[in-house]
Amino acid sequence: MSVRLAGVAIFMIAALYTWYGRDYTASFGDVLGPSVFPMIVGIPAMILSASLVVFPTGQVAWPDRSHMLRQVAALAILLGYAFLLLPLGFPLATFGLIAGMGIVLGGSPVKAIILGAFFAPALWALFDQVLGLPLAVLGRWFT
């Protein structure tokens, strides 16, 4: 039963992803436009998740409580990143994401903070300066 429930959940997420991504537009990019990528990812995800509902196989071993809490914490960090990206700006939000995920995944807090402090501006420079994808340094809260 758990495999079928997972299949239904994945199908719903893929369907929403495909539905909301179909009208995505950008002022730069490929001739086909950026709305093609959600279709390329979403449609096969829906087909594969539907196969889990129709043809469930295997047994599901649920993780223990500590692993479940780590997964919930990781999900909360990812959702927080999505909500705080515009208000904080890319480097600060990405710093929080990298440092938080490093700690949740069992790393040393000092090392996670150092990695976040190094990689957040490095990723901003890569995307903004090298690849030419405009990312705000400061978010709405700071401008």
Image (tube, grey):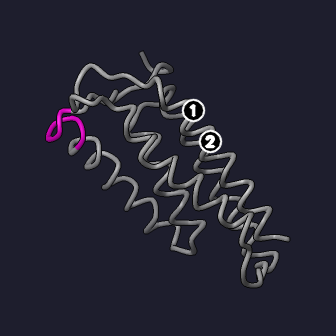
Seen at 34% across and 27% down, the residue is: 136
Against 93, residue 2 (above or below) is: below
Q: Is residue 47 left or right of residue 32?
A: right
Depth check: 67 or 43 in front? 43
Q: In the current view of this chain or complex, which residue is farthest to the front?
A: 54
Asked if the residue under mark 1 is in contact with the one under mark 2, i.e. CB atoms within 8 Å, the reply is yes
Vertical order, 118 against 82 (above or below)? below
Q: Is residue 115 above or below residue 83?
A: below
Using the image as rendered, state which of residue 40 and residue 91 is in the foreground: 40
Residue 79 spot, x, y in % from top left: 62, 44
Measured as percent of width and height from the top left, residue 27 is found at 26, 19
> Is most of the magenta stretch helix, strand or loop?
helix
The dot on residue 19 is 1
Label 1 SS:
helix
- Circle 1 Cα neighbour tier, 10 Å, few/some/many (<14 / 14–19 / ≥20): some
Q: Name the residue type under label 1.
A: Trp
Indicate the quadrant where residue 25 lies: top left
- The tag on residue 75 is none
Count neighbours of disc 2 (C-alpha within 10 A) and say few if under 14, some if 14 to 19, many if 20 or more: some
Tag 2 residue: 15
Q: Distance between the residues labelled 2 and 1?
A: 6 Å
Is residue 96 rendered magenta in the image?
A: no
Residue reaching furthest top?
143
Type of the residue with mark 2: Ala
Q: Residue at x 37, y 61 (%)?
A: 115
